[in-house]
Image (spheres, rainbow, N blue to C red):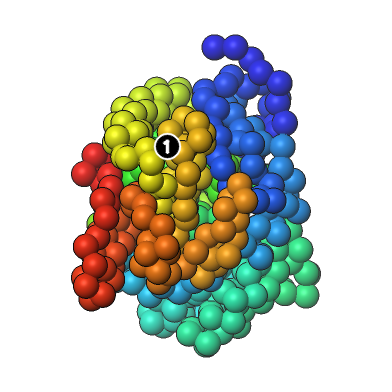
Amino acid sequence: MSQINRNRNCPVCISASTDKIITVDFELFDGHPMNGGYDVVQCTTCGFVYANTPVTQNELDHYYTELSKYEDKTLSTGGGFTENDKKRLADTAKFISQYITDKSSRIVDLGCSNGGLLKELINLGYNNVVGIDPSSACVTITRQEVGCECHQYSLYDIPNSIGKFDVILSTHVLEHLLDVRSAIEIFDNLLNPDGYVYIECPNAACYKEVIHAPLQEFNAEHINHFTETAFQNLMGAFQFGKITTGDKIFKIASDQDYHAVYGIFKKDNTNTYIQQYDGTIRADIQEYIDKSNIILDEIKRDIAGLPENLPAALYGIGQFSFKLLKTDVFQHGRKFKLFDNNNMNVGKKINGTTILAGKELLAEYKREKFSIVISSLIHEAAIRKNIELLFRENGEVPPVILGFSRLL
């Protein structure tokens, strides 16, 4: 292992000493701040794994304010608009209620997305809940669907006038932030004495357990990779005592398991925490990388077997598409087209190619024949069904459709 030049200090312990684990690269939307990829590194002081990226917090804030997928009710998580998402949020609310028994507690969900967790808390009788999110669309949806107080702020721009809270919820937020320690300082400032913090993120120790797409967890959104040890190191540095931590499993759109690490912490100014080194995460991450690369190699072989004289149409433009477009099967001149059902993506360009709406697929095919690669493994079944239905209803024979969920 060799030390590398860094762009970020460790988000948990601020050490500058790192070891490189892997370089990941993306072909992102034109103008995206993370085009060019980054190194995934491990802090040699506390063991935390994170993205060594040169992007700024302002650039990331712009992404989540203007470009985020999370305001699409049909595709996003966090609003409880699908059966799996609703169950996840309901289970989370019930778990929190075991520790926060006062239903009048003032509770804020920082990065509330479309308000699904707040809605489940209201269903349990909590009557003083507030949402905060950087997306104006998410704020509007939360106000309309949940009917609670909700404000549009970046985490780093929340005014003092918002007041204090008894409970802070931060679910699937910290993995997106460059300056994690400043976030915890903000939590501290927003909390009443003896307040609680509930945090939840993807569990890096369990990436190896279920591969949702090759190297999916190393993406343009998730730049911090938390474990229970990392949570305790981070919160302990700010005198938050651990109430409980653990791993939870919920179902995602593909009906696969997804592991998340959670923790409940309480401010304790008498707490003296001794930092622990996360001695197992490196092996866990390497196993995840090795499994991912085996799958990715087979996917590349399948795509390479498509007719070379026809473009390949990627359908479902997300994190795996961004990586796939950087592999040799597309970097060596193969023509491609891009289709997506997410209106937030339609019209954007990747390397100069415009993303077209899924409903335009047949008309585009009639203009120029192509093979289809379903590049959203999570939504593969639904995409395949829609493509076949579209062609069949119009009396057309579908082209070759490649999908890869069978490899997972």
Query: What residue do we see at 48% from left, 85% from top?
Result: 145
The vertical placement of 4 against 27, above or below, is: above
Residue drawn at 71 percent across, 21 percent down: 5
Task: Point out residue 129 in the picture as x, y percentages from the top left corner.
Answer: 54, 78
Q: Amino acid at mark 1?
A: Leu
- Percent x, y of residue 125: 41, 82
Which quadrant of the rendered structure holds the N terminus?
A: top right
User: In this view of the protein, which residue sits in the foreground, 237 or 225?
Assistant: 225
**Residue beneath disc 1:** 215
Q: Nearer the viewer, residue 265 or 114?
A: 114
Q: Could you say where residue 387 lies in the image, as x and y percent from the top left?
A: 29, 64
On the rendered structure, is 100 left or right of 3?
Answer: left
> Can you say which quadrant of the picture contains the C terminus?
top left
Q: Answer whether residue 82 is visible to the viewer in this image.
A: yes
277 lies above or below 216: above
Q: Nearer the viewer, residue 202 or 318?
A: 318
Q: Residue furthest top?
A: 1
Residue at screen point 70% across, 33% down: 8
Q: Is residue 60 left or right of residue 317?
A: right
Above or below: residue 111 compared with residue 31: below
Circle 1 sits in a helix, a strand or a loop, which is it? loop
In the rendering, at what x and y percent does residue 203 appear?
Answer: 41, 43
Q: Name the residue rendered at 27%, 55% in the picture.
A: 399
In the image, 267: left or right of 321?
right
Quadrant housing residue 98: bottom left
Residue 194 appears in the figure: no
